[in-house]
Image (spheres, rainbow, N blue to C red):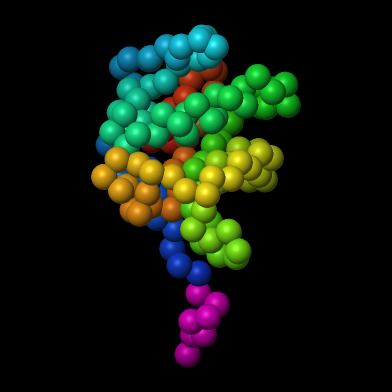
Amino acid sequence: MENLENVKPLKRYLNDEFLELRASENYYSLSYPFSGLFMTDGLKYVTDKLGLQWFIDTVLSYQGNEDVKVITFQIWTLERITSGEKAGQWRVVLYLDNIPVIKQLFSTISLEDNYEEKFDIFKIYLSDNVLFLPSED
């Protein structure tokens, strides 16, 4: 018989709800001070639908950091903390080879239609000056 205390709950990925968003036809230029960076159709759709512009702004705010700028393929996540004393809080994380190199904590988030209750992880990529969803890779 399996010990239920050792079973970790499955993470709910917001990206799974938007798998149909593939191959962008348009790229949206981000405004100053982030000129030269672009966002795909799919990411713009999700950002506008859920009110995630603050997450994009958080990712962009690190692009002036030389240690971040040299990472040619950036993997960013918005993650719910599910255990420990910070359970229920959220963090924005930059991963490099599956190792978190930047973590920024948010005590709460608020998305359109209470979407924050429907997922645990949202992932985006930044490469070649374009922010995009994994399904658009």
The stretch in magenta equals 1-7
Q: Is residue 77 above or below residue 42?
A: below
Query: Is 56 left, or right, of 83 in this rendering?
Result: left
Residue 73: quadrant of the picture: top right
Query: Is 53 left, or right, of 26 in this rendering?
Result: right
Image position, residue 72 (x, y; %)? 63, 24
Work out which quarter of the rendered image holds the C terminus and state it: top left
Frontmost residue, 5 versus 83 = 83
Q: Is residue 100 magenta?
A: no
Image position, residue 127 (x, y; %)? 54, 23
Which residue is drawn at the image coordinates 52% and 41% (left, top)?
77
Residue 122 visible in rendering: yes
Image position, residue 116 (x, y; %)? 37, 49
Residue 39: quadrant of the picture: top left
Frontmost residue, 59 versus 26 = 59
Which residue is drawn at the image coordinates 44% and 58% (left, top)?
11
Residue 95 visible in rendering: no
Which residue is drawn at the image coordinates 73% and 26% (left, top)?
67
Q: Is residue 69 above or below residue 135?
A: above
Frontmost residue, 41 versus 136 = 41
Q: Residue furthest bottom?
A: 1
Frontmost residue, 62 versus 72 = 62
Which residue is drawn at the image coordinates 63% and 42% (left, top)?
103
Q: Residue furthest right?
A: 67
Q: How many marks?
A: 0
